[in-house]
Amino acid sequence: MDRLRAPVGVTRLTLSRIPEFEPPAEYPAMPTRTWRLRLMPEQLTLDFDVEPVELCLPEDRRAVAALMPYLLEGLAGRRPLEHLDRFTAPPARTRLRQLAQGWRRLPFIPVAYRVHTCRIGSGVIEASCTLRWGDNRFRVMTLRLHRDGDSWTCAELHLL
């Protein structure tokens, strides 16, 4: 073993043990935090007739999937928006024109990547569609469809 050498000028070197450390018997109390409850404003409540319906039917998804290419081609500038008049209600038509107004013709056609549907009443579907917007971007379109006889009409749409 190596011998311990004292620094120059020191004649004697003393080693002492480090005292054992034990935590205090009682830990100090953590500072208390005051939580405040923020109340939300009252929500708008609408009265609906309660009727049992299945939440998602395969035909609902097919209806949305059949309509999406027309809407996306219209938004991309590949299809005149007048072609969509028979599939869309006036509020949705206005919204489509607003969305397409500021855009140039897109170099691609957006593709419906995923479609989720929820039946909220008899003859009414709400859907959200994840859109592949070019190579590596995604957007979401939400739709509300109403049954009009044998076909579906897009009553509202929003592009997020």
Image (cartoon, rainbow, N blue to C red):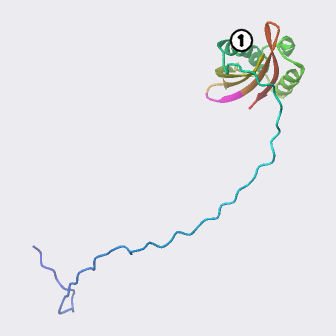
User: In which image quadrant can residue 15 be found?
Assistant: bottom left
> Quick check: 113 above or below 20?
above
Main SS of residues in magenta: strand
Q: Single out the residue that lies furthest toward the top.
A: 150
Identified by mark 1, the residue type is Ala
Q: Residue at x 74, y 22 (%)?
A: 106
Give the mark count.
Answer: 1
Front residue of this view, candidates 22 and 12: 22
Residue 108 sits above or below residue 26 on the image: above
Q: Quadrant of residue 112?
A: top right
Coordinates of residue 157 in the picture (x, y in percent): 79, 25
Tell me residue 17's x, y (percent). 23, 81
Answer above or below: position of 115 versus 28: above
| Disc 1: which residue | 66
Name the secondary structure under disc 1: helix
Q: Position of residue 12 (x, y in %)?
A: 17, 91
In the drawing, does residue 150 fall left or right of residue 91?
left
Q: Position of residue 79 (x, y in %)?
A: 80, 13
Q: Residue at 28% across / 80% down in the picture?
A: 19
Q: Which residues are magenta?
A: 136-140
Reply yes or no: does residue 34 show up in magenta: no
Q: Residue at (70%, 28%) from the top-left corner?
A: 140
Q: Nearer the viewer, residue 89 or 148?
A: 148
Choose between 154 and 2: the one closer to the eye.
Answer: 154
Q: Is residue 137 magenta?
A: yes
* 137 is higher (above) or lower (below) than 34: above
Q: Is residue 46 left or right of residue 136?
A: right
154 vs 53, left or right, is: right
Q: Residues within 10 Å of mark 1 (few under 14, many from 20)?
A: few
As drawn, which residue projects farthest toward the left?
Answer: 1
